[in-house]
Image (tube, rainbow, N blue to C red):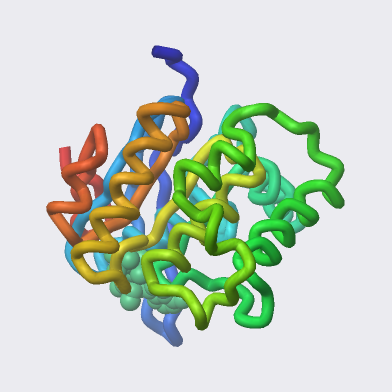
Amino acid sequence: MSEKKVIETIDLKMTYKAGKVAVHALRGVDLVVEQGEFVAIMGPSGCGKSTLLHILGCMLKPSSGKVVIDGEDVSNMSEQERTEVRRRKIGFVFQKFNLFPTLTAEGNIRLAERIRKNGRLPDSGGVSMSEILKLLNLEGRLHHKPAEMSGGEQQRVAIARALVNHPAIVLADEPTGNLDSEHSQIVLNMFKQLNEKFGQTILMITHSEEAASVASRILRMRDGRILQ
Ligand code: ADP
């Protein structure tokens, strides 16, 4: 197994200003995720999970500390530079799927692919689109719009969309939060296969112990820190 670090944070802190009050969402997070890991992050509401995910996803700049994503120090990058790193290296899967309602499944996936090509990114290999569609069992649903699909199918489209960039890491924010237990199981199984068969690095926030149990490592957060 490769020892390459896909994520490294050092003494990461995030303080939000809410009027005159400072909210310490992250109070010093040291985290290393190596290539090929499947990490689940758990913890009570408000402990800083989403803040951490948004910083790792280059959507939010930390107040202090260091963040290295796939070898690039993004801690002090401009918003434009962070957007570029996000586009090249990160695939997102959200609780609410976030698909374009007027596009078919294929249209949603191709749109993400076009964004990649417009960015003139080299094809870094990884999982091919046909392999992705086969694994996600989506081949028969490509011409359907989101409203014509079940939640589980929509989430599988969202996962396919996240993978077209061959991202260094997939960040998933409660990916089974809107699914019943049967579809949750299917989606979790797919994450597990992506990780085991293709070595996809995944970091997933979840409230469910069952969901977390498919990961290779579980991190627990409390009050802005990762518990040791
Ligand atoms: P979790 O994902 O674990 O529920 P969050 O990262 O969303 O935790 O929030 C951590 C803390 O930061 C909470 O106290 C939350 O209210 C606060 N917080 C999150 N986003 C903002 C914001 N934009 N402005 C002010 N406070 C925020």
Q: Residue furthest left?
A: 209
Residue lying at 22% horizontally and 54% vertically, measured from the top left: 42
Position above or below: 227 against 126: below
Q: In which quarter of the view is residue 104 placed?
A: bottom right
**Residue 216 in picture, x, y percent from top left:** 25, 33
The reply, left or right, for residue 206 in relation to residue 21 is left
Residue 62 visible? The answer is no
Residue lying at 54% horizontally and 63% vertically, measured from the top left: 141
Residue lying at 58% horizontally and 33% vertically, measured from the top left: 127
The reply, left or right, for residue 124 in relation to residue 69 is right
Q: Residue furthest front?
A: 140
**Residue 88 in picture, x, y percent from top left:** 69, 43
**Residue 16 in picture, x, y percent from top left:** 44, 71
Badge count: 0
Of 126 and 131, nearer the camera is: 131
Of 58 and 199, nearer the camera is: 199
Residue 49 visible? The answer is yes
The reply, left or right, for residue 43 in relation to residue 176 is left
Q: Quadrant of the N terminus?
A: top left
Residue lying at 47% horizontally and 69% vertically, measured from the top left: 97
**Residue 146 in picture, x, y percent from top left:** 54, 76
Q: Quadrant of the C terminus?
A: top left
Where in the image, quadrant-wise, is ligand 1 located? bottom left
Position above or below: 73 against 76: above
